[in-house]
Image (tube, rainbow, N blue to C red):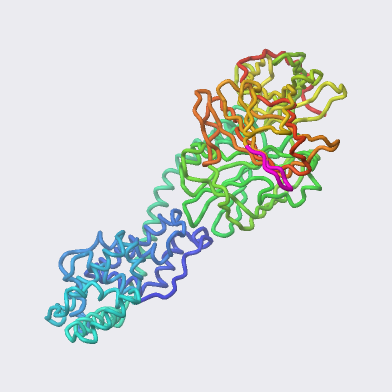
Amino acid sequence: MILEKVEPISTASIQEKGIESVVDWFDRYKDYFYTLGWFYVQNQQQMEELFYRCIVKVHKEWPRYKGGVSFRIWVTTIFIETARELSLDGGLQVHEDTRQDLFEAIDSLNSDEKEALVLTYAVGFTLEEAARILGISADKIKGLLFSGIKSVRNKLYGTDLHGCVEYHRHYIDYLEKSMDRPVKIEFEMHLYNCPECQADLGSFQEVAMARLNQVEEVDLIVPSQLMENVKKRLAEKKEHRKKKTKKRTKWALIFSGAFVFLLALGFMTGALPKAYYAWTEDDEQLRSFLQEGLGERLSLEAESEGVLLKIKGVVADDFQTLVFYEIHSLEEDKQYFMGFDDGVSVENESDIMKTQSYPLYSFPDAEAEMNKNAKNVFYGKVSLRPLEEDDGLIKLRITRIQELTNDPGYRFAFMPGEYKTGNWSFEFPAKKQPSQEYTIHQQKEIEGVPVRMDKLVIAPTTTILQYAINTEKMEKRIDGVNFRTLEVNKKEMKADLYGSQFMDAQHENEWMAYQTYFDPLFGEKPKEVKAQLESVYLSVVKPETIDLGGNQKFPHTIEYAGSSITIDKVEDGPMTNVVISDKDLENREYESLQFDFQDGSAAYPSISYVDTKGVLIDKNGVEYDPHSGPVDYERLEKPRYFVTEHKLGIEGLEKKDMKLKISGYNALKYVEEVWDLAPVKVSEEKE
């Protein structure tokens, strides 16, 4: 009765033959399940019912099987659960006289003892596997095995145990060969000197290893009509469904023609895509594009290393090529996502894409409702470089995907270092969608620095605000502007947290061009446009030289820009080691310093290494240490990161002439401003 190897039902077989593939599988292993079934049911009618119900349930539960346990354990668990529903209290009706006593002895046990004995010594599962099927601990199943074997032994031989009680607990471990060596040696020494324990253990072994393992020798021949009757019942059920379907179809045909006409009319007039894709597309992100008539819907699949990867759709424009995917972990309750250049590549990229551009990063949206429905399924999108021409055939290859953490404390849910490797390849066409550009005649000012708003670009996958920052004032310059939102016709779009990019220096040397990306804006012709600022990153020139040579004593403290800066230590040797700390944060004007060291020589010394420490502080003054663990930056309100310590190794510096030269500092300032912009349309489509 023990099965050494069980071949699982293949996915291809299920897809091709449906429940018939499950019937074929049970027919192949019917001897195993037939013998197991006799431990629960009393007659052939119940046995047929047991097989029928179990086949239907395995077919129904098949999509939920993820491979976390062996297929044999999974099906056996379903079989036992079904058998429990059909079991009776009157004892087993087995008529083979050669084994009647054994079945009666087993039937006299309580249900827990019986199942523990059957699963381990009759069916052949390990203690751990049997414990998993029954949902109990390994220690609990050892206790059930001991009491069960003891009861069967008493029923068969009419005698009780006479060995030493303190050694009873070792019987099962000894039979299972799972004893630690020191305990085993002690037990065997006791057995050598104790005839009673020898007799007990011998009878235990005879019951467990001989009588129970010989269950398959009972002449339980599977009746030929068993599987035929089960197949007949399934066929009758299928025919009954067909008749019900025909009745529905008759009425459906009456209005189907009119429905198809209305559906076609709706798509021609643009009235139905939103409703249609709301019904048929479960990917929330892709759905919004399809409802606007943008991109291509795809249905591509590839499976590797227990992971099924689906490509759902693609949307391309002048700025990126967005690919929407769905990842199923078939063997584990894990969610995976993928990122460009991290195991994701386009094999023909140099032939069809703009290689000088770099795609936007698409963060996995772990908070989306569609990603909360199943523990092993994840919907996401990955940004590729834009197409060079209007269309192209993309040859996408994925060799590595990354696991998401299940910790709800982190919004973006990264689990660094947890990767799954495999080989998933796809080919699909993509067509570039047009963008619209609008000029903006506006010039603003932040912290006394002019900022010129140049252009608004509305593309299918993103909305872009292009601007330039004046660099004439050297004493203070803006290194970056962070926008919070862009509002177009009272529709608000969030800025891409990591979507601001430096473009280039314009022809006028005093201007530097940038662009910020926002959420896509579908079908809107901008009339009212407002940009809400969030913060600016400043670089301020404020020089100061501190003489650290001669007989200067350390630690040495100076006051600078609202903070006390301390040079903690200077050590002699081939390399000068310096520690600078500025932990006075209350009135500090800056996040980090711009500095260098100098001695009496003409050449600047070389800084061999720099090690910094800092602290993250939110609007309310709460401190977070990023060095002690990950911090969910997105959840903090107006955070600022202050560098509090620098450790430097400096070569070529004479201590006696050493000077610390501070040229200035960098500061992050939050700006509560909303700018009204006046876009003027340039063209309907980019040339």
Quadrant of residue 653 in the image? top right
**Residue 574 in magenta?**
yes
Towards the viewer: 86 or 191: 191
Coordinates of residue 115 in the picture (x, y in percent):
26, 67
Left or right, 253 with respect to 449, comes to left
Count of labels in the image: 0
Q: Quarter-wise, where is residue 305 in the image?
A: bottom right
Give coordinates of residue 370: x percent, y percent: 50, 39
* Residue 620 lies in the magenta-colored region: no
| Image coords of residue 386 (percent x, y) | 75, 39
In the displayed structure, would residue 605 be above or below residue 65?
Answer: above
Residue 343 seen anywhere in this rendered image of the structure: yes
Name the one closer to the observer, 339 or 520. 339
The answer to whether 497 is drawn above or below residue 126 in the figure is above
Q: In the rendered view, would you say 251 is above or below 417?
A: above
Q: Find the residue positioned furthest to the right.
A: 507
